[in-house]
Amino acid sequence: MKEIKTEVYALGQHISMSVHKARRVIDQIRGRSYEETLMILELMPYRACYPILKLVYSAAANASYILRSTEANLFISKAEVNEGTTMKRLKLRARGHSYQIKRPTCHITIVMKDISLNEYEEEFFFHTDKFRKNADKFLAIDSMEWLKKTNRKNQYRAIEDHDRYSNGGPWDKK
């Protein structure tokens, strides 16, 4: 069976900028929709916005080509900034001296997901044979006993899904 891609990414490497300056902008757009991200980046007064805006455009173009999705369904699922190599330059000074200038670079990754494909995945999961065989485990509250059974010494660490905070759960001990 062919695996369906649900996310695409755009990667910008060796961008001449400090990691802290890029993270300040990336933290504002993480988890937002595509249109909202474009508005935020166009109106922010930071120098880091332009390369990030180019990466968002590139990720959206990748999504429209690979996933065949529209821009209205896209949102940024993951955005990260990693430190790149530091370029070292020499600044000449008086009397034959010099001092070092460090020019930091960063790598920016923008990952976009399509909301409509996520809904398709959930719909596909609920119609598979594996789900139908174990439907009582997934859906029925009475069949949650298989989650409670544990081999640990402390039995109250087991997962209890129904009525955790009332009538006899691990929190009602006196």
Image: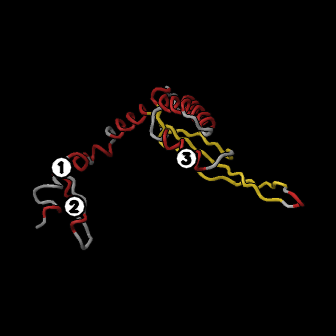
- Measure how far apart labels 1 and 2 are at the Cα level: 12 Å
Give the residue at x 22% y 45%: 139
The location of residue 142, given as percent across then percent down, is 15, 51
Q: Quadrant of residue 154?
A: bottom left
Residue 100 as seen in the image, left or right of residue 55? right
Q: Amino acid at mark 3?
A: Arg
Q: Which of the two labelled residues, at mark 1 and mark 2, occupies the earlier sequence position?
A: 1
Q: Amino acid at mark 2?
A: Lys
Q: Is residue 171 visible?
A: yes
Q: Residues within 10 Å of mark 3 (few under 14, many from 20)?
A: some
Q: Residues within 10 Å of mark 2 (few under 14, many from 20)?
A: some
Q: Badges 2 and 3: C-beta atoms under 8 Å apart?
A: no
- Measure how far apart labels 2 and 3 are at the Cα level: 42 Å
Which residue, given by chain and number where applicable, does mark 1 sit on? 141
Tag shown at residue 165: none
Residue 8 as seen in the image, left or right of residue 133? right
Which residue, given by chain and number where applicable, does mark 2 sit on? 148
Q: Is residue 1 visible?
A: no
Question: Viewer-proximal residue, 63 or 171?
Answer: 171
Give the residue at x 45% y 29%: 73
Question: Viewer-proximal residue, 2 or 33?
Answer: 33
The location of residue 3, given as percent across then percent down, is 49, 41
Give the residue at x 81% y 55%: 90
